[in-house]
Amino acid sequence: MGVAFIADVDGNHRNRLEGLTLVELMVVLAVMGVLVSAALPNIGDGFADRRVAMVAREVTSLFQRARYMSMAYGRAHQVVYENDAGTSLTGHPYAFETLRGTSGGCALTSFENAGGTVLGDMDCGNNWRCVDSVYPDTYDSDPGDSDLIRVDG
């Protein structure tokens, strides 16, 4: 960088060895502002992708937990997604519920088909889910928000 000369009031020249002028500083700030404004949309997309990945990991861990509980108790465990406006067993409108069966294998043949006929269970009586226990622990990445993603396990 060369040496700049600045004239003072008397017309004498003095050397400017260090420092920035206000104009140079404003140009640098303007360039940085343009770069930051170009990067902001990409940062927002990254946060959204991170949130989706985080919820996907929570759901995956819920299924792994059901598998481990099944091995620990020697009973079948079922993970059910409820989308029923809060009338599920945990009371949350949108939730995954982990249900423990009464035996090592549940016969999940009880359901209402399109014709309205209800088929009977093979070995669970009227309890088509073979449920004797519910785990209502809530896993929510952001309970303060108003989104519809809530994972219960």
Image (cartoon, rainbow, N blue to C red):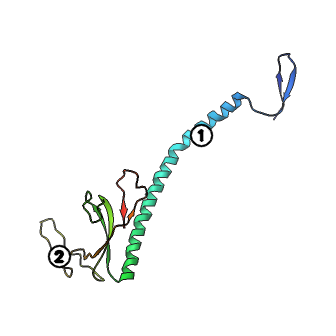
Q: Residues within 10 Å of mark 1 (few under 14, many from 20)?
A: few
Residue at 59 percent of width and 36 percent of height: 33
Residue under circle 2? Answer: 126
Question: Judging from the image, what secondary structure is the residue with disc 1 in?
Answer: helix
Residue 35 falls in image quadrant: top right
Q: Is residue 34 above or below residue 131?
A: above
| Residue closest to the eye, 70 or 87 | 87
Residue projecting furthest to the top? 10
- Is 104 left or right of 13, judged from the image as shown? left
- Is 102 left or right of 18, judged from the image as shown? left
Question: Where residue 72 sits in the image (x, y, percent)?
Answer: 39, 82
* Disc on res. 35: 1
Look at label 2 and name its amino acid: Asn
Q: Quadrant of the C terminus?
A: bottom left
Look at label 1 and name its amino acid: Leu
Say which label, 2 or 1, has the lower sequence index.
Answer: 1
Residue 114 falls in image quadrant: bottom left
Residue 105 falls in image quadrant: bottom left
Residue at 29 percent of width and 78 percent of height: 101
| Residue closest to the eye, 49 or 88 | 88
